[in-house]
Image (cartoon, rainbow, N blue to C red):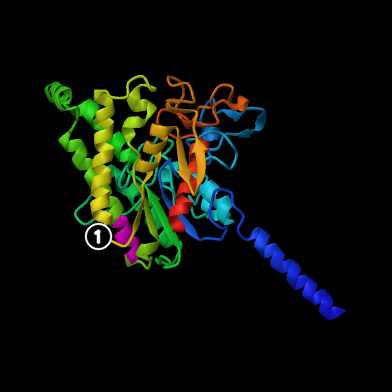
Amino acid sequence: MKKSLSLMYVILFGIFLVLFSGIKTGYSTVTSKDIVIFGDSLSDVGYANNFHKIKKNWPDIPETPTIVKQATYTSPKVGETVWPQFLALKYRNENIGISNNINTPELNINQSVIPKLIGNNYAAGGSATVCKGIGEDGDYAPPPIGPLRKGEYCDESEVSIQEHNQIDSYLNQNNNQANSKTIYIIWGGANNAFLALGDFSNNTSTLSKLYLFAKYLIVNKVSPVQEISKMQSAADDIAYDVEYLVKHGANANNIYIINLPNLGITPEATDNGQNMNSFKVKLFESLSKAFNQQLQDDISKTNAHIIYAEKFFDRIVKDKAIKINSANYSFLNVTQSACDFYGDNSLMCIPKNYISGIYDKYLFEGQVHPTSYSHQVFSIYIDDIINK
């Protein structure tokens, strides 16, 4: 009798494994993974965790007034807004979707950030690849993604910020050692582009702008030399991050670099979908293209991998859909902002009538940042690449 019961339990357990070990939810087979993430707002799961207390008019999530919108730059679903959070759910490792901000620049402490020594996600909204990113004066200075390359330097006022870079923060918490079995994902460069665009707008002479515009009318391209050089340098920074992690014990084959989407497809570039082929579109496009080409050249010399966000977003804009692992993910609107285009930025905005569901399948939440739905689909895209 005991033998029969034991046999029955073995059979039942086997059936359980067959039925549940390969659950399909658009992702590959469920397995636990140790993943560490470095980046900017496109990967930020709540680095500036005190912003809602110091920022006026911080929005509550519709119909849940006791829950504030998390301090990330996406749609307001609690705990399911950015791709690392979806991967955390998939891989059954909540640390992937929790910010580690213990080594934040001093300016941030008890202002925008309450430091916490938890989580595997070091990404911070506004971060550049090195030195000063895009923050808020007096309240928030985002730590850059990685260390300086040889011969590279920051302005004196930015040295302290640079010392708090994300990768060194991670290493300092782990005896200055990376783990050869850990997967590292880095996504940066977007804020370098927006800093470069700001420099172009403010510091490029009118004559130079007229020359570039005339050239655009003839060849339908824009090539601002200084700004392109800055983006190539940003790509070199990311490539050095790979080298730096490997030097400290990481396995290059476990490092994944996400390249930039074509910035020319964003509502910011297209004036909310009104003009898909303007000088502004080509200007934005030229910077992300320069970054991606340099990144491709640099990473090809290593064993690290590139996750092509550019192809992912271009496919969606072209077809209003993308197929991953035989599953099709459709989008309703791929050119316009779900939030009021002329209203609050993505940090503060929540689409009007969000609870109606009409914005669920927008590609963009704000002028630049994707919606939660886009992030969810992108997490499936990332998972597919990691598990190939």
Q: Residue at x 45, y 50 (%)?
A: 382
- Residue located 43% across and 40% down the image: 41
Is residue 242 shown in magenta?
yes
> What secondary structure predominates along the stretch shown in magenta?
helix
- Between 317 and 103, the one lying in front of the other is 317
Q: Is residue 343 above or below residue 45?
A: above
Q: Residue at x 35, y 66 (%)?
A: 248
Locate residue 60, reporting x and y percent: 60, 29
The location of residue 302, given as percent across then percent down, is 28, 61
**Nearest the camera: 174 or 214?**
214
Q: How many marks?
A: 1
Please state, as top left, top right, bottom left or bottom right, where the C terminus lies in the image: bottom left
Residue 113 seen in the current view: no
Mark 1: amino acid? Lys
Residue 92 shown in magenta? no
Q: Horizontal and vertical percent for residue 256?
A: 38, 55
Image-based side of 168 in relation to 219, left or right = right
Is residue 298 shown above or below 179? above
In which quadrant of the rendered view does residue 366 lie?
top left
Q: Where does residue 55 sit, x and y in percent of width and height?
A: 51, 30
Q: Secondary structure at mark 1?
A: loop
Residue ID at (21%, 57%): 150
The magenta-colored residue range is: 240-246
* Residue 289 in sight from this viewpoint: yes
Image position of 332 (left or right of 233): right
User: Which residue matches tag 1?
Assistant: 301
